[in-house]
Amino acid sequence: MSADFTDHYLWTADNVRLHYREFAGGAEGRPALLCLPGLTRNARDFEALARRHAPAFRVITPSFRGRGESGYARDPLTYVPLTYLQDMGRLLDAARLDRVIIIGTSLGGLIGLLLDVTQRQRIAGLVLNDVGPDMNEPGLARIRAQLGKGGNWPSWLAAARDIARRQADLYPGWQLDDWLAHAKRLCRVSRAGPIVWDYDPEIAAPLSLPHGDQQLDLWLALDSYRDRPVLSVRGGHSDILLAETQARMQARIPRLSAVTVPRVGHAPTLDEPEAVAAMKAFLDPFL
């Protein structure tokens, strides 16, 4: 237990242990914030955001299976959106989340879009962090090419410097302290001693197979949010969510507000001043 959060665990239908953190808060009837991380990320990604918004809101930050403190799947082909949807449905029940605002980064945003199919009555609003119904293929190819590469650093400093070299274009204004904090969100100390990525390398396995979820019309999924507030956050240098896609989202969904975080690639941390201001404006009506 921490002074800021408590750790919780639950079991999925196929016996994978899922981890989530809970930052207590929120008045009766106020929706909780359910923060869903990106492909290789985990619950630690949202620590600063959670501390900003609790205790005004109850904040839940899970790690998908195969990431962080969540267990690794025996079958790597369960690292797909359909399984994540099922897992998050169980989490909503286990954490007794009757009403939530989903804050989803990249993959987490896609899961937020799709959760509306099965959890519509629970979802009060949606924040899509650097993701939309159309994603830029060169950016996706970059992520696939980098997935699982590297690791085995002898120290946190070595990890931070190598990650800075790899991702310099994504966060060009960062200093060494920023990269060290970033490395500690992305990585862990292995049992053998070296610093390694904090995810199961097998999460890459389904990416080489045809994806049934790619046949889904995510624009229709976005349409289902017409009656609720949506915020789109885009990195100004993003190679995943293009400016024209965000503009199309705005034109299609009247209640969608949008912000671009300058000098940031995929994806904003949501700790940038522009993102913090946009999040405050988005959440204030729920207070």
Image (spheres, rainbow, N blue to C red):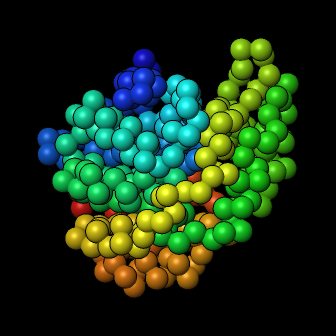
In-front residue for pair 77/146 = 77
In-front residue for pair 5/214 = 214
The residue positioned 36% from the left and 41% from the top of the image is 86
In this view, 163 is above or below 244: above
Q: For this view, does 8 lie left or right of residue 165?
A: left
The residue positioned 27% from the left and 52% from the top of the image is 118
Using the rendered view, name the quadrant where residue 154 is placed.
top right
Give the quarter of the figure containing the N terminus.
top left
- Residue 16, image x and y in percent? 46, 25
The residue positioned 66% from the left and 69% from the top of the image is 137
Instruction: Report the residue that reaches farthest toward the top.
Output: 192
In this view, 228 is above or below 38: below
In this view, 168 is above or below 149: below
The residue positioned 77% from the left and 53% from the top of the image is 145
Using the rendered view, name the quadrant where residue 26 is placed.
top left
- Residue 39, image x and y in percent? 58, 47
Q: For this view, does 139 lie left or right of residue 73?
A: right
Residue 277 visible in the current orientation: no
Residue 285 visible in the current orientation: yes
Count numbered badges in the picture.
Answer: 0
In-front residue for pair 238/214 = 214
Q: For this view, does 50 lie left or right of residue 198?
A: left
Instruction: Report the residue that reaches farthest toward the bottom.
Output: 251
- Residue 56, image x and y in percent? 28, 44
- Residue 5, image x and y in percent? 40, 27
